[in-house]
Image (tube, rainbow, N blue to C red):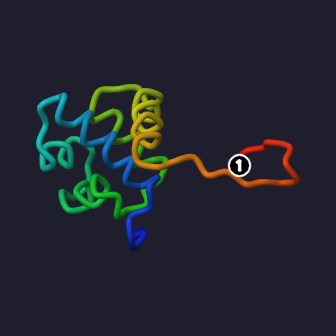
């Protein structure tokens, strides 16, 4: 499913997948073949334009030969680099959301 303009979360996930793919020396086409996905879909994921299902995240992790937790860990690191934490003030108690 397309998400329209890339959100910081989708961009961070795409960046994490791209980093793992490049580290493994795999092309987008190779990753697509290994995961059973279309090359343009993988490209859209890497650009943050696609909303990836849990099942497809598992397929990508398997194709990259990493644990899903490593993929999510990379996402978290990448997300902190592309998005600043948002804060909401709720009466000055310092809660962050």
- Location of residue 7 in the rendering, given as x and y in whole percent from the top left corner: 44, 61
> 41 left or right of 25?
right
- Location of residue 26 in the rendering, given as x and y in whole percent from the top left corner: 13, 36
Q: Quadrant of residue 73?
A: top left
Q: Quadrant of residue 6?
A: bottom left
The image shows residue 61, relative to residue 92, as above or below, that is above
Q: Residue at x 21, y 41 (%)?
A: 34
The image shows residue 46, relative to residue 70, as above or below, that is below
Nearest the eye: 95 or 33: 95
Q: Residue at x 33, y 40 (%)?
A: 16
Q: Which residue is mark 1?
A: 97
Quadrant housing the N terminus: bottom left
> 42 left or right of 3?
left
Q: Secondary structure at mark 1?
A: loop
> 2 left or right of 34?
right
- Location of residue 37 in the rendering, given as x and y in whole percent from the top left corner: 26, 54
Nearest the eye: 25 or 93: 93
Seen as rendered, the residue at the extreme front is 92
Q: Residue at x 43, y 69 (%)?
A: 3
Specify few, some or many for label 1: CA neighbours under 10 Å numbering under 14, 14-19, or 20 or more. Answer: few
The number of callouts visible is: 1
Seen as rendered, the residue at the extreme bottom is 4
Q: Residue at x 29, y 27 (%)?
A: 65
């Amino acid at each position: 499913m397309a998400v329209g303009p890339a959100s910081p979360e989708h961009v961070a996930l795409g960046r994490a997948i791209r980093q793992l793919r490049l580290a493994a020396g795999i092309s987008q086409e190779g990753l697509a073949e290994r995961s059973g996905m279309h090359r343009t879909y993988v490209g859209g994921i890497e650009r943050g334009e696609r909303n990836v299902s849990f099942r497809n995240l598992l397929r990508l992790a398997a194709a990259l030969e990493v644990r899903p937790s490593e993929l999510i860990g990379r996402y978290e690191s990448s997300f902190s680099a592309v998005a600043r934490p948002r804060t909401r003030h709720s009466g000055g108690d310092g809660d962050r959301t």
